[in-house]
Image (tube, rainbow, N blue to C red):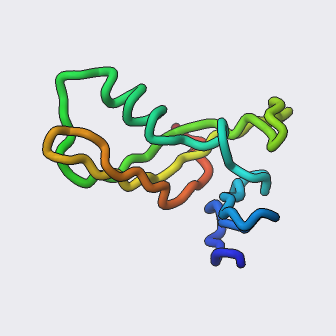
Amino acid sequence: MKETKKKGYASTDVDAVGHNVRICPVCGRPLQGNNLVDAKSIVEDNLYYVGGVSIVSDVWLHCNFEHRYTEEGTTMENPHKLVAVVKAAFDQKGKCTTFDIVEVHPADKTK
């Protein structure tokens, strides 16, 4: 089953084992593992690291990252920049309770 694809946005496909896999909107290869942002890399390693600020609500995050690895874990010849749009929720103590990647699209080349 394939998700309806908006032009320039990642689609979702199902792999042989039945897991949903995001497909890169630039090259058509799977976005998984080291190729995709996760709560640890964005929230723990970036937001929490700075310190002194606590987010205590639902927020939308635009996370810049690079699609640079193949499914086999080797470096791609032509890595490209993407943006993951994430909906995250934080409790009243500032702990991230939800981290959902809503969409992935190519990075704006003018920035």
Residue at image coords 60%, 43%: 36
Determine the image quadrant of residue 54: top left
Q: On the rendered structure, is 82 left or right of 70? A: left
Looking at the image, which is closer to me, 58 or 84? 58
The structure residue drawn at horizontal position 52% and vertical position 49%, both measured from the top left corner, is 84
Q: Residue furthest left?
A: 92
Q: How many marks?
A: 0
Position of residue 83 in the picture relative to residue 40 (left or right): right
Report which quarter residue 39 is drawn in. Answer: top left
Q: Residue furthest front?
A: 17
Q: Position of residue 96 (x, y in %)?
A: 31, 43
State the image quarter where residue 75 is shown: top right
Say which residue appears at 62% left-offset and 50% top-offset: 106
44 shown above or below 33:
above
The quadrant of the rendering that contains the N terminus is bottom right
24, above or below 56, in the image: below
Q: Position of residue 33 (x, y in %)?
A: 66, 41
Residue at 38 percent of width and 30 percent of height: 44
**Quick one: 47 or 77, which is closer to the camera?**
47
- Left or right of residue 63, residue 87 in this image: left
Reply above or below: 38 against 7: above
| Left or right: 92, with 68 as reference point | left
Q: Position of residue 13 (x, y in %)?
A: 71, 67
